[in-house]
Amino acid sequence: MASGVKVADEIKDIFQTMKVNRSSDKAKERIRLVQLGLNDPQNTLIEVKKIVMEKDLDELGNLYTYAQSLMNDKECTYILYDCHYETDITKKEDLIFIMWSCDCAPIKKKMAYASSKNSLKKVLDVKFEMELHSKDETCARAFIKNFGKEIVKKLEGIDVCEN
């Protein structure tokens, strides 16, 4: 379903910055998470709601825990997340696109976000795309199952292995 929703140019610029800025760059200035959303009540533009930089984590704490806090009941949002995780073999960093559409959210809002997701996906070239609908899906162990075959041991420095 085409929605006619446009993506703010700023999002394209931020994505390019996130894509090329890796750990060798100024670490504290690195963008780690961007919350995106539809401009209420028009729903004609996907715009930036919040940007979290590496330096903000001193105050916010664990980035994944913070990302979970953005996924509110009765709400929908998009999140572009620079995820840091560890496997058996190595440390990794990947950009992840998350669409949060809570099962409890109003139908009209869920439809608006679902129909405008493709407009945003055309701009974002990410390795992982996730669509989450309940708090159960946001717990770290459930979240890492979306990484496919990779066995993730740590997510943002926190152990997620089953003992």
Image: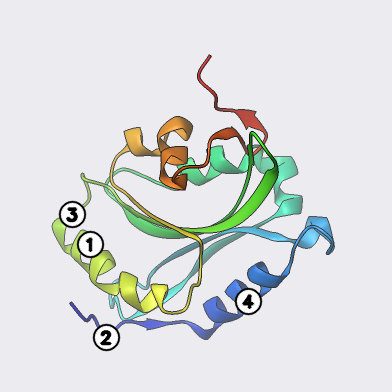
Where disc 3 sits, the SS reads loop
**Looking at the figure, which quarter contains the N terminus?**
bottom left
**Residue drawn 71% across the image and 50% down it:** 56
> Do tag 1 and tag 3 residues touch (Cβ < 8 Å)?
yes
Residue assigned mark 3: 106
Marks 1 and 3, how far apart at CA: 5 Å
Whether label 1 touches label 2, CB < 8 Å: no
Q: Are marks 2 and 3 in contact (CB under 8 Å)?
A: no
Foreground: disc 2 or disc 4 = 4
Residue that appears at 61% across and 80% down = 13
Residue marked by disc 2: 4
The residue that mark 4 highlights is: 16
**Among all residues in the image, which is located at the extreme left?**
107
When asked about the image quadrant of residue 72, the answer is top left
Q: Amino acid at mark 4?
A: Gln
Q: Nearer the viewer, mark 2 or mark 3?
A: 2
